[in-house]
């Protein structure tokens, strides 16, 4: 059951069968302290006994990015991944003003690393799950968030399950550390051998290639891929054919990637991650769209895409060709459907889990067997497939958060109501 505190803090429909915890830190008054205020939101699945990992959804640079990130921990699709693997979902919010220097946080050595670790300790205490402070991480980073993850990789390789770099890495910046403009901002990063054992995916938008503003996201992630793969790292390159710097529909590929990596790497007990056996993976030529078992690959291994398993290899092939992935299975059925008589009519509320493969698009409301409405009536998403929660530029739900609620106006109690979930590709639940 949800705690009374959780029910009092926010509407139940926003929690999707779990609880959310938050910590806030002001700007440090110390000369050596962190220059931005921060918020860290942590979602934990209902009934989980031991948190096995923390999925970190790190936004990019700028005020718009951090304002959009306040809903990262409320994301039903990312929650579905966390629930499957008994993980927590962390949404950091670095309150960087638009004109401020992003390097002051996206280089974790400037203070965001210390604050991130502090948040895990404090959220472990607040949630009653001490393992949150020491559990391994999946790192998802967009733009400056990818920059941040690439440097954190050098410092904590033993704690990282996998990394998804969406249009961002610090690799090129630290390679150019002799540039006077970068001196003191991006010192050279020395990657230990263990860093090259982390499964990774570089995911720029194809339209970034040659773009005046965002070309560095393409060239940087491609250079990182080539350098890491030449050293034998399990990394792939997954260009999004439909986008520039916006995240588009990458979540369908990144959730699938983390799902595969969590299966391969999470320990049954303790926190020591299992190592990847690359011989059991799949390979594809760089910029190709067909993958085969590693044993059957005939191309150049040093420039090949590494993919963790057959399921992800299919999702990756779909994604690099179409910008999204396919799904042939229906979503989970909604639950906790309840009705209440109000002055406006009968109010129906429910809870639901997102489809792990394609998320949630919409709900169909039925009364005595006939359809009487949809929630939302017309789902919208300017950055990709229409979704129940909407979608921001940075892969987070739009505000205000969508509620699982419908009012049958003017109706009286006594009818039978049913809720049908519709996933991202249009398949309906029971």
Image (cartoon, rainbow, N blue to C red):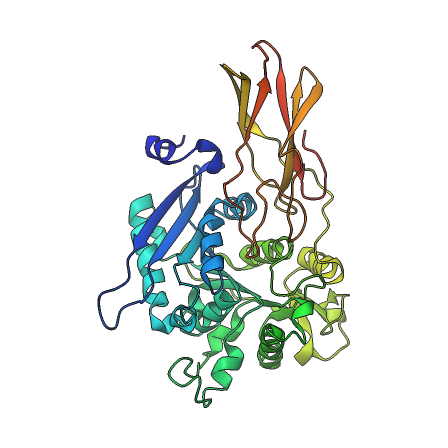
Q: Is residue 354 left or right of residue 122?
A: right
Can residue 75 be seen at all in this image of the molecule? Answer: yes
Q: Position of residue 223 (x, y in %)?
A: 60, 80
Where 44 sits versus 350, above or below? below
Q: Which quadrant of the view contains residue 333? A: top right
Q: Residue at x 76, y 77 (%)?
A: 299
Q: How many marks?
A: 0
Q: Quadrant of the C terminus?
A: top right
Q: Which quadrant of the view contains residue 46? A: top left
Q: Residue at x 47, y 48 (%)?
A: 71
Can residue 87 be seen at all in this image of the molecule? Answer: no
Q: Is residue 74 left or right of residue 305?
A: left
Q: Which quadrant of the view contains residue 386? A: top right
Depth order, front residue of 330/62: 62
Q: Position of residue 244 (x, y in %)?
A: 65, 65
For the view shown, which residue lies furthest in the left direction?
A: 30
Where 174 sits versus 241, above or below? below
Q: Quadrant of the N terminus?
A: top left
Q: Residue at x 40, y 63 (%)?
A: 97
Q: Position of residue 189 (x, y in %)?
A: 44, 81
């Amino acid at each position: 059951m949800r705690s009374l505190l959780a029910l009092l803090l926010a509407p139940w429909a926003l929690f999707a069968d779990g609880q959310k915890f938050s910590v806030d830190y002001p700007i440090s008054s110390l000369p050596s302290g962190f220059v931005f205020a921060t918020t860290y939101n942590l979602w934990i699945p209902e009934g989980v006994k031991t948190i096995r990992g923390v999925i970190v959804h790190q936004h990019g640079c700028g005020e718009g990015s951090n304002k959009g990130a306040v809903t990262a921990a409320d994301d039903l699709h990312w929650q579905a991944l966390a629930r499957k693997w008994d993980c927590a979902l962390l949404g950091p919010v670095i309150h960087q003003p638009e004109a401020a220097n992003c390097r002051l946080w996206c280089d974790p050595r400037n203070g965001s690393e210390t604050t991130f670790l502090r948040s895990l300790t404090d959220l472990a205490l607040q949630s009653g799950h001490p393992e949150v402070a020491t559990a391994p991480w999946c790192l998802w980073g967009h733009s400056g968030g990818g920059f941040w993850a690439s440097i954190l990789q050098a410092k904590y390789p033993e704690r990282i399950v996998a990394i998804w770099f969406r249009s961002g890495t610090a690799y090129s910046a630290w390679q150019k550390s002799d540039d006077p403009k970068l001196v003191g901002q991006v010192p050279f990063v020395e990657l230990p051998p263990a860093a090259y054992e982390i499964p990774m995916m570089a995911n720029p938008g194809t339209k970034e290639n040659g773009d005046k503003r965002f070309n560095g996201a393409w060239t940087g992630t491609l250079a990182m891929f080539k350098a890491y793969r030449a050293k034998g790292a399990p990394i792939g390159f997954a260009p999004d054919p439909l986008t520039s710097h916006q995240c588009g529909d990458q979540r369908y590929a990144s959730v699938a990637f983390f799902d595969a990596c969590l299966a391969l790497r999470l320990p049954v007990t303790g926190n020591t991650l299992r190592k990847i056996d690359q011989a059991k993976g799949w390979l594809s030529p760089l910029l190709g769209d067909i993958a085969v078992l590693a044993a059957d690959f005939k191309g150049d291994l040093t420039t090949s895409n590494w993919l963790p398993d057959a399921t992800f290899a299919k999702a990756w092939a779909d994604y690099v060709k179409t910008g999204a992935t396919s799904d042939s299975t229906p979503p989970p059925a909604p639950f906790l459907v309840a009705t209440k008589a109000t002055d406006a009519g009968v109010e129906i509320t429910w809870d639901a889990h997102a489809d792990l493969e394609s998320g949630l698009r919409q709900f169909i409301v039925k009364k005595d067997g006939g359809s009487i409405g949809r929630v939302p009536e017309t789902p919208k998403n300017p950055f990709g497939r229409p979704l129940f929660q909407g979608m921001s530029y940075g892969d987070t739900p739009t505000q205000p958060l969508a509620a699982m609620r419908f009012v049958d106006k003017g109706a009286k109690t006594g009818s039978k109501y049913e809720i049908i979930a519709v996933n991202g590709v249009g398949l309906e639940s029971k």
